[in-house]
Image: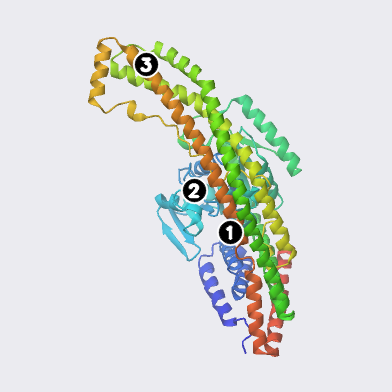
Amino acid sequence: MNSGYTKDEGIRVAASDEERITGSLEAPAFSLEADNLLRIATLAGAFNDDQIRDDARSAAERIAGGRFYVACVGQFKRGKSTLLNALIGEPILPSGVIPVTAVPTIVRFGERRQARVRLRSGEWTDIGFGDIEEYVSEARNPENRKGVAALEVFVPSPLLREGMCFVDTPGLGSVFAGNTAATHAFLPHIDAAIVVIGADPPIAGDELALVESVAKEIPDILFVLNKADRVTEHERNAAISFARRVLEERLQRPVRSIFEVSALEQLDGHGSQRDWAQLWDSLEQLIRRSGQQLVRDAADRSLRRLSSQLLTVVHEERDALTRPFEESEERIRQLREVVSHAEQSLNDLGFLFSGEQQRLSKMFGDRRDSFLKSVRATAHEDLKSALASLPRTSGPRYRRSAIRAAQDIIRRHTMPWLEVEQQNAEKAYCQITKRFTELANDFLVSARNLGSADMAYLPQGLESEQDFRVRSEFRFYEYLELVSPASPVRYAADLILGILWAHRVIAAEAHEFLDRLLETNSERVRNDLENRVTESRRRLEAEIRALLRGLSAVSERALARARTAHAAGTAAVAASLQKLANIEVELTRLSSTSNRSS
């Protein structure tokens, strides 16, 4: 008789896991914890729950190796990748690219430099260092279309020799304030954290929420104010004072140190050391004082979390066997109805969002016109003064100097305006996304009320205000071809103008060039803001829709197996129930074992 569960398949999964993981065993002290996690992976495989199985396998592999994860978190533009590169001692991680939040990049010790990637559909594959960006940048791997599950980088850094691993997961500090699927899935794996803050603003609301979520599970958090070279001492002191106050209020515990560093200065080998030595010493103390305990705590957290998730699946399987099929079918139908309703509501809201986008587009255009009116006269006066101070050299050289002066003037006016416009645009975007997140939260409440096992993987709720999903792509356009014109006719004409002392002609053309720069770059700012709204809206919708996919999978699989068992007869049903009871006892024991050890 077929009870719906294949024992031999479970045995083969276990043998495969054990051979793979124990073959690379580096820390026998944690072999028991790794074995327990492998057992959970085996049981999850028997229920066809790939998420729990893969999570347990991954946890077992790193616990067996005695590795603990120190995640670098914070908002975009904090310089997190640069900070990790400076700690590693070389520019390994791509910086200045838009990350794929679903792809954590783990940096661990290795005798030689190498990298590997694991796709959801396969095993680890070695890649070149130059190919890392192909998998972690939004430009090369939009929305993680390549299906990257993880990426590991091996470096011979002495700081990582004793088991500490750095994790570069930029998405942790951006979308859903820690509640995206990627963030929700990765937070339990963090053993310690480096929180990177800035001076303007020092720490944002979503970062505070993230730090609070992390602090509930782990005590070891280091705070770093990066880019300390870009602000004055007064600004640094004000930022640190503000950050310490709000962090201590939120965490309800003292914040001992906030290290002032410039990762870029450290990486380039110039400038002040600032608090770099203290930061390095704190990481070494973390290894000596807490390294082994952090690994053990990570194993305990994984055992408790995965046992609890799998117990939920077991209960769903048991209920499907014991209640009438009609009741299970009705619950699945209701869940599908909730999903269908949410999908339709998203479609309806899409039309409203489009109208709001048009309103924002007009607002951006009006603000651009105001900017042009306010700055044009001042910019021309600045250029007039700059040109008056230029030596009347040869015509081509004078043109190059005049054009560079115009570029510098427009850049000085445009970049601060861009920062202000980005803040205003993000506030406006937050307001029009509230309807989407409110809808998603209503959906989560409705889905949880059905009591389905699938709900174990859902976040508790989404933050009502959403930041931009993408960073600015604005690049100041300089018209470099005009600095050193390739045209021999222009060069000859400039030579003649210089000989005739007709520099005023070149000066007049420099003023025309300034207007051209001003018009072009202000329009590029407006386009950049519109593109960020459009792309952020698209990603927000995609993230919410991702929550709708596959929610009834556990219930549907349980019902299918229950039908198989009932079709085989009463004895098969009884055997299945007994097996589930045994698994429940085993999972409860594994969870209680972790509780005792912690």
Q: Which mark is residue 157?
A: 2
Between marks 3 and 2, how big is the CA–CA gap?
Answer: 57 Å
Q: Amino acid at mark 2?
A: Ser
Given residues 121 and 233, the one toward you in this image is 121
Give the percent coordinates (x, y) of residue 118: 48, 61
- Mark 3 vs mark 2: in front: 3
Given residues 582 and 20, the one toward you in this image is 582
Q: Which residue matches tag 3?
A: 508
Between marks 1 and 2, how big is the CA–CA gap?
Answer: 17 Å
Q: Residue at x 51, y 34 (%)?
A: 526
Res 586 seen here: no
Q: Amino acid at mark 1?
A: Gly
In this view, the residue farthest toward the top is 501
Between marks 1 and 3, how big is the CA–CA gap?
Answer: 69 Å
Other-residue count near label 3 (Cα within 10 Å), few / some / many at <14 / 14–19 / ≥20: few
Other-residue count near label 2 (Cα within 10 Å), few / some / many at <14 / 14–19 / ≥20: some
Give the percent coordinates (x, y) of residue 416: 54, 27
**Can you say whether 79 is above or below 166 in the image?**
above
Q: In which quadrant is the C terminus drawn?
A: bottom right
**Can you say whether 437 is above or below 17 in the image?**
above
Quarter of the rendering containing residue 371: top right
**Can you say whether 120 is above or below 392 in the image?**
below
Q: Residue at x 45, y 46 (%)?
A: 92
Tag 1 secondary structure: loop
Other-residue count near label 1 (Cα within 10 Å), few / some / many at <14 / 14–19 / ≥20: many
Give the percent coordinates (x, y) of residue 147: 49, 60
